[in-house]
Amino acid sequence: MNWESVWAIARKDVSVALRTRAVVLPLVIVPLILMVGIPVLVGLISGMAARMDVASVNLDELTRPLPPGFGAEYAGLSDPQVGYIYFVVYLFAPMYLILPLMASAVVAADSFAGEKERKTLESLAYTPTTDRELLFAKILGAWIPGAMVGFGGFIVYSIVANVMTYYVAERIVLPNALWLLLAFWVGPAAAAFGLGVTVIASSRVNTFQEAYQIGSLVVLPLVLLVIGQAAGAFILSIWLVVLLGLALWVLDVVVFALAAASFRRTTLMARL
């Protein structure tokens, strides 16, 4: 592996992506909405409900799948206070995974499709790298921003969540083992899966928008995860998060193997 060439292409991809408005806007707006806007809005509502002593409807049913220790740990708090802690720590957890997946997919959509739109794909194809090195460079150039956005989102969310839970219930709840696993084990795997699918799509379509639309479909399983947990079908425990991360890393290996087996720069040149 020619690491010097790989890193050079990856650095160039990151630099170009951060100068592209279609890439930067989702990387800024979506994290602000998910990691700041939603927890603050729900926290303000929960705080007002707690101060007015408003009882939550069916809170026992909502938190039924939680570990037995959850109720004992937060005994003495009102229903709105317990409900907000449940939302911040458990219910919102699957939504966090949308962040690294989306971020890597946006950058990956710009990998080959963006090169075609900027008329720079031909010069890229003649770089002194093998097909596998070129593909790996493109994957690395999208994974790094996706993983960094995920880590940054985790830090911002932890700060916002702690501020709001202290406002609502005078408690500090993050980071805990569940969220550390989400941020450093599952998040990077989700970013890799999203970019793997999107890079494959990007190498086969002609525009950034087409690649992004195809790549965004990988968010659907996470939406089902959010719905399933909200419906009380399961709860994200530590062991479930470990297994989820393991499953994603296995899928990453499969996706990258398929991409490496099918990627040929001659095919890309034929599509110019």
Image (cartoon, rainbow, N blue to C red):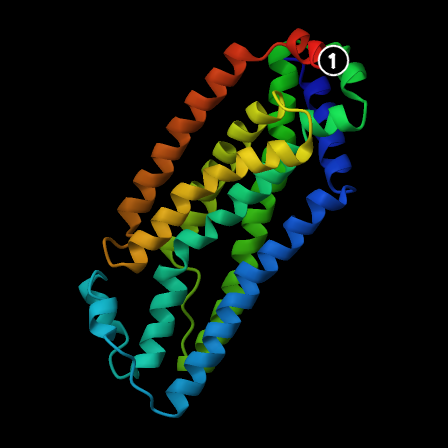
Q: Is residue 233 above or below residue 58?
A: above
Residue 38 in the image, given as x and y percentages of width and height: 51, 66
Tag count in the figure? 1
Residue at the spot of label 1 = 125
Q: Is residue 48 above or below residue 248?
A: below
What is the quadrant of residue 117 in the picture? top right
- Which residue corresponds to the image point at 74% horizontal and 24% vertical from the top-left? 116
Residue 113 in the image, given as x and y percentages of width and height: 68, 27
- Which residue corresponds to the image point at 40% horizontal and 49% vertical from the top-left? 223
What is the quadrant of residue 33 in the picture? bottom right
Q: Amino acid at mark 1?
A: Ala
Residue 24 in the image, given as x and y percentages of width and height: 71, 47
- Which residue corresponds to the image point at 24% horizontal and 59% vertical from the top-left? 232
Q: Is residue 254 left or right of residue 54?
A: right
**Quadrant for the N terminus in the image:** top right
User: Which secondary structure, mark 1?
Assistant: helix
- Which residue corresponds to the image point at 55% horizontal and 49% vertical from the top-left? 151
Q: Is residue 57 left or right of residue 161?
A: left
Mark 1 closeness class: few <14, some 14–19, many ≥20 residues within 10 Å: some
Q: Is residue 230 above or below residue 102?
A: below
**Quadrant for the C terminus in the image:** top right
What is the quadrant of residue 91 in the picture? bottom left
Q: Is residue 70 left or right of residue 143?
A: left
Residue 67 in the image, given as x and y percentages of width and height: 21, 61
Q: Residue furthest bottom?
A: 52
